Amino acid sequence: GEDVEQSLFLSVREGDSSVINCTYTDSSSTYLYWYKQEPGAGLQLLTYIFSNMDMKQDQRLTVLLNKKDKHLSLRIADTQTGDSAIYFCAESPSRGGNTGKLIFGQGTTLQVKP
Amino acid sequence: ETGVTQTPRHLVMGMTNKKSLKCEQHLGHNAMYWYKQSAKKPLELMFVYNFKEQTENNSVPSRFSPECPNSSHLFLHLHTLQPEDSALYLCASSQDLLLAGSSTDTQYFGPGTRLTVL
């Protein structure tokens, strides 16, 4: 089946690193995504990783992928108060053809304390 | 205006009302989507349209009726809703239906319509 799970809440201090974790079930997903949702706004694509990579770095963001364990993480270095938001992990299953589905986790609320 | 826009941003309606949500994308995309976001639940895909044709209806009750008159506009017509339908309804678009091998084609989201059913 298709399922993506995340922890619901993470609280860190400004300047610390944040690590948001995600597990997924569909090994057919070629790309995995991280989206950010700020209060009152829609989802914004932050970064993505191709399934044959195990790490991708993009400025303060580092994505780690353990394909064997189907575990994805997003690390935010030097977390700022502006990083407070809900972070969604998503996979794009390719089994059954291209249907346009993205499967999302429940979202992790990141709270950054000054 | 650029990106994906949704109107209204907030809507309060009674169970007997009929209302419509509107989504417009200014990105030249061919695929559009409706999602429902309820508190503490994963985003639920409701409908997918590709080149104005519905390609997916994710077992959505008939009180939700989508309409896609062209690739830039998507509507969600609402009638006789229930209080449990209260949620944030998000519209998204992508260049084409997500391809398994695509890194750059992902979904771009609008800000959502916050719906409250009394």
Image: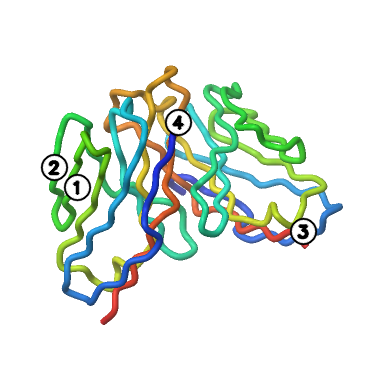
The x, y position of residue A88, in whole percent, is 38, 51
Along the horizontal axis of the image, is B21 left or right of B15?
left
Q: Secondary structure at mark 2?
A: strand
Q: Amino acid at mark 3?
A: Met
Circle 4 crowding by C-alpha within 10 Å: few under 14, some 14–19, many from 20: few
Q: Amino acid at mark 4?
A: Gly
Same subunit: marks 2 and 3: no
Along the horizontal axis of the image, is B106 left or right of B85?
left
Which residue is tagged 1?
A63
Subunit ID for the residue under disc 2: A
Q: CA distance from mark 2 to mark 4?
A: 25 Å
The circle drawn on residue B61 is none
Circle 3 crowding by C-alpha within 10 Å: few under 14, some 14–19, many from 20: some
Same subunit: marks 4 and 1: yes
Q: CA distance from mark 3 to mark 1?
A: 42 Å
Of the image marks 1 and 2, the number of the one nearer the N terminus: 2
The circle drawn on residue A55 is 2
Subunit ID for the residue under disc 4: A
Task: Mark 2 vs mark 4: give the one in front.
Answer: 4
Along the horizontal axis of the image, is B58 left or right of B19?
left
Q: Residue at x 46, y 59 (%)?
A: A41
The x, y position of residue B38, in whole percent, is 57, 55
Q: Secondary structure at mark 1?
A: strand
Of the image marks 4 and 1, the number of the one nearer the N terminus: 4
Q: CA distance from mark 4 to mark 1?
A: 24 Å
Circle 1 crowding by C-alpha within 10 Å: few under 14, some 14–19, many from 20: many
